[in-house]
Image (cartoon, rainbow, N blue to C red):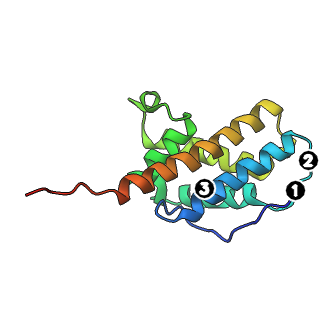
Amino acid sequence: MAIMTTLYTTLDLRDPMLCLLASQAAIEIEGHLSGREVKGTPAQDLSRVLYEATRGETPPASMGAELFVLAYSISGGNRKYWRGRNSGEVLSGTRLIATDLCDYQNLPTQRQEALRDFCNHLSMETVAYQVSSCVRPRLVA
């Protein structure tokens, strides 16, 4: 099974390629879990994007919508899970996922399934953000 890889380097929620990359990574991991040979590296590409978004003194993903999308993706869409927690927990969880995505083939099946689910949720949360930011309420006179 061949997967188209994308050249994507930043965590830009407005770019539809992020959704595609996350979906491709989920497909790659599912293919591996199913015993199919998968060509392409979307999981590694997504790993690089997540790593770049969480590194540095003030990571790009430490504020705003990116932080919420990552948090909701990590928790499987459970918005209540993050009440009372801080951005550092989201960033460290994202870094752990980025590390695991690089070498997911050597992880236990349960962790591979969790990574696949994260990729699916990241794709869905990105689309939800794009739809919500495109739909503007209209004022009626």
Query: Tag 2's secondary structure?
Result: loop
Give percent across and percent down for residue 34: 87, 40
Nearer the observer: mark 3 or 2; the answer is 2
Give percent across and percent down for residue 80: 42, 28
Q: Residues within 10 Å of mark 3 (few under 14, many from 20)?
A: many
Is residue 65 shown to the viewer in this render? Answer: yes
Give percent across and percent down for residue 87: 44, 43
Ranked by sequence position, the earlier of labels 3 and 1 is 1
Q: Amino acid under label 2?
A: Arg
Q: Are marks 3 and 1 in contact (CB under 8 Å)?
A: no
Q: Amino acid under label 3?
A: Leu
Residue 50 bears which disc, if any?
3
Q: Amino acid under label 1?
A: Met
Residue that extends furthest to the left in the rendered view of this protein: 141
Give percent across and percent down for residue 13: 48, 59
Q: Is residue 127 above or below residue 30?
A: below
Residue corresponding to mark 1: 1
At x 77%, y 38%, the residue is: 112
Q: CA distance from mark 3 to mark 2?
A: 26 Å
Q: Are marks 1 and 2 in contact (CB under 8 Å)?
A: yes
